[in-house]
Each structure stands twice: as C-alpha cells, then as structure tokens.
Amino acid sequence: MQINVKELTMKDKRIQLNEKLDLSELLSGRQDLESFGELTADLTASGEDNTAVVEGTLRLPVTMVCSRCLGPARETLVIPFHERFTKEAVPPETEEEEENLHSVQEDVVELAPYVEEAVWMSLPYVPLCKDDCKGLCPVCGTNRNERDCGCSTDRIDPRFAGLADLLNKDEGDL
C-alpha cells in the first residue's frame, strides 16, 4: 500500500485505498493472541497545504486470551488511522507538537509500517471476554462466569491476621 506524496500535494488529488493486509509476520510471535484475521484498511489520501493526509479506519478481527478467566476474548478492533506526510523539512519543535507529521525524502511512501504501528499500539493491554467478566476463583480456580464455586471470599488484612487467630483461641476456651 503506497501513496505518491508529490502527486497528492501538487494536484489536490484524492484517492481511496481499500486493501486487505496479512499481518501474520507482525503478530505471529504474540502469545496473548490465539488467532487473528486479515486487516481491512479503508483509507483516503488527499493533499492539502503541501502535505499528504492519509486517514480512515483499520479493522482487524482478533481472538485474545481474557486476562481474568483465560477464556477466548473475540472482538474486531476498529482502529482510527491518521498520518500526514510532507516533502518539506519539519523543524524539530513542530515535529514534537504534531506527532503524525512525517518528513519524507522519496515521492512514494510505503504505508505498511505506519499501519503496523497503529495496529500494534491498539492491541488491548488487558483483553476481556466481556466487560463484567468475573474471572477465576483465587481459591479453587473455577471459572466464576460458568458457575459459583462457593469458596469463601472473606479477606483478612494480613496485618490483623494474628488478632483473628487470638480471637479464635479465646472462643475455643469458653
């Protein structure tokens, strides 16, 4: 997937980029991903003020491991994409302010690295199978979404655990 920055900025041109990309090389090493499909990129490239603007959405179906219950967490990531390219030199202070503005030397820019970065940064850090996932029981390991195990969930502050033992001894002496 490529754009010609010089052509876009000179002619006030607008082009549609609708492509499917295989990200298996990028995502295959991730242990938290059980599976993933093809990335669908629906982008529009246009020129404005000596800058080529590429924006749109990326869609990627993924199945990850739920961080609470370890079950499958299926979702389609919808990732907004917005990058700008210019052939002019960008001053360092402007570059810091405008994160998505890239100064390029060549006329033709390959968009794949920018798309891959957007996907990589959008993968959930803590994937969930559903928002109200109850997770695994810390005592017996039962998936609490499937059934209630009946384990005690009383928590005793470890700083007061000695006092609880003392109270249990006093009750036994009576």
Image: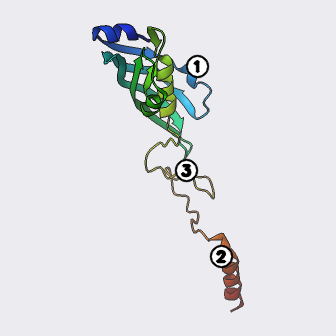
Disc 1: CA contacts within 10 A as few (<14), some (14-19) or many (>=20): few
Question: Relative to residue 103, is residue 16 drawn left or right?
Answer: left
Of pointers 3 and 2, the one earlier in the residue sequence:
3
Sequence-first tag of 1 and 3: 1
Residue at the image point whose x is 61% and y is 56% from the top:
138
Q: Quadrant of residue 88?
A: top left
Helix, strand or loop at disc 1?
A: helix
Disc 2 target residue: 160
Q: CA distance from mark 1 to mark 3?
A: 33 Å
Tell whether label 2 touches label 3 (CB within 8 Å).
Answer: no
Sequence order check, earlier mark of 2 and 1: 1
Secondary structure beneath label 2: helix
- Which residue type carries mark 2? Phe
Total marks shown come to: 3
Q: Residue at x 36, y 14 (%)?
A: 17
Closest to the observer, 136 or 56: 56
Helix, strand or loop at mark 3: loop
Instruction: Report x, y in % for residue 166.
Output: 70, 83
Query: Circle 1 sits on which residue?
Result: 25
Dot 2, crowdedness within 10 Å: few (<14), some or many (≥20)? few
Q: Nearer the viewer, residue 149 or 87?
A: 87
What type is the residue that disc 1 sits on?
Answer: Glu
Q: Residue 27 in the image: x percent, y percent?
A: 56, 25
8 horizontally vs 101: left or right = left
- Which residue lies at the image location 40% right of the left edge and 14% below the top edge? 19
Q: Amino acid at mark 3?
A: Asn
What is the x, y in percent for residue 84?
Answer: 39, 22
Q: Nearer the viewer, residue 52 or 23?
A: 52
Which is in the foreground here, disc 3 or disc 2?
Answer: 2
